[in-house]
Amino acid sequence: MTIGAGIILDDERSWSSITWVDLPFTKNIVRNPKAFIRKVTETELVTWVSFDHDLGWYNNSKEVTGYDCLKWLCRHLDRNPSKPIPKVYFHSKNPIGVDNMRNYWDNWLNTQPEWRVRL
């Protein structure tokens, strides 16, 4: 089990190729939603996450995106209120996807109690 880590969700890019967002260094790059869920649940403290939107991943002919993974992360944090809220970045080149993810995240954050630890 990893103690503390940042995670990049992206089907193609490496940390060094994401130059338009100032991300802390990490070697934790996951390429699909299943790997993302596994990495988050196996990591004791997720300090930050950066999301791509278009992952090129399908489940039963339905596209699964970074937005779906962000919604899963919020549900996971709701079920585990003792876990700190990680810092979140959006590095997708899809501007509509970024807007949707950012709005969802901001709305979710606004529902969190003041005592909840945020990284």
Image (tube, rainbow, N blue to C red):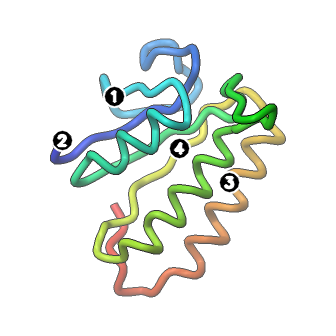
Amino acid type shown at disc 4: Tyr
The residue at the point 16 percent across, 47 percent down is 3
Element at badge 4? strand
* Nearest the eye: 118 or 74: 74
* Nearest the eye: 40 or 87: 40
- Label 2 – label 3 distance at C-alpha: 27 Å
Amino acid type shown at disc 2: Thr
Image coordinates for residue 49, horizontal then vertical, percent: 44, 43
Image coordinates for residue 94, horizontal then vertical, percent: 78, 31
Q: Quick check: 42 above or below 103?
A: above
Q: Quick check: 96 above or below 20?
A: below
**Left or right: residue 88 compared with residue 24:** right
Circle on res. 2? 2
Q: Which residue is mark 1?
A: 28
- Label 4 – label 3 distance at C-alpha: 9 Å
Q: Closer to the observer: label 1 or label 4? A: 1
Q: Are marks 1 and 2 in contact (CB under 8 Å)?
A: yes
- For marks 4 and 3 on the same chain, the one whose residue lies earlier in the sequence: 4
Circle on res. 102? 3
